[in-house]
Amino acid sequence: MCGIVGYVGKKEAVSKLVKGLKTLEYRGYDSAGIALLQSEKIVVVKDKGRIANLEKSLDYNNLKGTIGIAHTRWATHGVPSKENAHPHMDQNKHFAVVHNGIIENYLELKNQLIKEGFSFQSETDTEVIPVLMEYYYQKYQDVMQAFQCTLKDLRGSYAILVISPLLPNTILVAKKGSPLVIGKGNDGIYIASDIPAIIEYTKDFYFLEDGESAIISDSLTFYNHDFQKIDKNSKTIEWEIDAIDKNGFDDYMLKEIHEQPEALKNTLNGIISFNQPVQFVGFALNKSYLENLKHIYIVACGTAMHAGLVGKLAIEKLCRIPVTVEVASEFRYRDPIIDQSTLCIFISQSGETADTIAALKLAHEKGAKTIAISNVFESSITREADHTLYTHAGPEIAVASTKAYISQVGLIVAFAIYMSEVLEISVSLSNELKKGLIDLPNLMGIVISHEDQYKKIAKKLVNETDLFYIGRGNDYHIAMEGSLKLKEISYIHSEAYPAGELKHGPIALIDKGTFVFGIITDPNIAEKTLSNLEEVKSRGANIILITNQNLKVEHVINIPNINPIISPILAIIPLQFIAYFIAKEKGLDVDKPRNLAKSVTVE
Ligand code: F6R
């Protein structure tokens, strides 16, 4: 939520900042702004709306400067408006600040500063930062001291960039609980909320720990929590620039749906091979630990939680260990029963989801072993967890998650197989699933090749206002994910229900002409779900069935047959496409749906 970018170097900063912001726009898109250091003055340009809107008001000929900071906002404190857009400055224009996170004690600080005679222009929490810096600067006449005193006063989460004419050629940087990467390129030093925004310029990145800060000029100086100088080594990230291009697709979401076979292959590369035990480099659990395990929690939000539900089924089936899947925002506040005999798995594409991180910290405090599943190298969650298993889906830029979901499902099933192999149980099922996971990328290609069929179905649904998705077992989990995709990008209301639960209430909503998606990929419960579909049909509903079984229904989307534990990886694809094509047909911005942001760094 909110994206920040900064540049100190030899080249003009504006175009680099705008380019970085465009890559970060998935983090928020209600207002944007930039600040440059120009002839020892700060120049700020900002506006309500998207970055394209900001771009229109940028006069590149006059916006010269090789040091700048920029921000794209997802409003938390104060409506989306020009006044509330970042960067924010103090009244003497000594400091310009961009910030991602929430300053929890901003009201208290603001009131104190108002009493001291300072004034504020915005409703944001962020504005207290430059004003507080100015307060301390007036007191000590020292910028670094002002910066450090300010950081000490802030409670909450932040990634902050500050420029000041009092400290030319420099950006001050601090991080606590919000993501920030620093990359050293040939023509300067780049700072951003995430790697894709600056991968074009460098593959060598520095990662700040929470509480650390840095002074960035033509060199880098790092400080720990106590403002003592520290050394840091850079890490090389092998992502290609192509990964953040649309590569000829209309939208990132469409591109990412098409990238799914590759994402799964890359995620499972080196982990799964048929006739070999599953292995994770640098990670192992021993048999006695697993035998003594009483409970596993899988904790996540949204789509990642849906991947966790598939994981639950796989772990329980293969390992016979009870698994509870929970939404992170609930888990963290309900005093869950956790001890050393509990394993807690946290799934997060971004690795920055505030509730998931808080839930992980809680599990740690209570003594559980913690495993993170994340797509982002060195993200916050990976640094908190005992172990991290990475999905290698590549950067996911569309707000609606597709390839990350597929990769999470593949990885957690691989993890379930791994545990069953250590426990020496469920051998034949494990082998079947390993073969299935190896076959899946090809089978996914087949499902993707029927894109035109999904487009035709989508056209029929454009004017619907309510849709239903039903299934049993994993088919219900697919229904949940399909329904979420539809809601978030097409703004059509939908419900996902366990097929057998429908007649306990929601069937009252089924009317003549209501469209109901049925999902049937498990032959053992196919007839049961089919009966439930008959029940809605006899009340006038139109059925669209996604199945790998030979079933006769008016509208059928056939997908290849595979073990139901991993069928979500195939069955979700038509539902992703249908949601996508409906949104396109409605003329909506598929990659940046209203009110949403890719990385939810506030609770
Ligand atoms: C939906 C979607 C969200 C995320 C959720 C968790 O398409 O993307 O529901 O899955 O916000 O995000 P991460 O996985 O980054 O923790």
Image (spheres, rainbow, N blue to C red):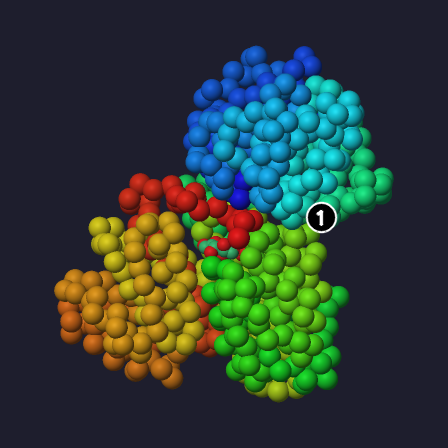
Q: Is residue 410 left or right of residue 575?
A: right
Neighbourhood count class around disc 1 (C-alpha, 10 Å): few under 14, some 14–19, many 20 upward: many
* Residue 1 point in image, percent of width and height: 53, 44
Please name the residue shown 37% across and 66% down the image: 479
Q: Quadrant of residue 274?
A: bottom right
The answer to whether residue 292 is visible is yes
Image side of residue 367 versus residue 602, left or right:
right
Respond yes or no on whether mark 1 lies under 8 Å from ligand 1.
no
In this view, the residue in front, 103 or 398, is 103
Label 1 secondary element: loop
Image-quadrant location for residue 418: bottom right
Residue at the image position 44 percent from the left and 76 percent from the top? 564
For residue 181, side relative to residue 600 (left or right): right
Question: How far across and how far down the image is residue 406, in percent?
Answer: 50, 61
565 or 123, which is in the foreground?
123
| Residue of label 1 | 210
Q: Residue visible at 55% across and 81% down?
A: 322
Horizontally, residue 56 falls left or right of residue 392, namely: left
Please, which residue is most extreme toward the front here?
115
* Image location of residue 258, percent across then percent down: 46, 53
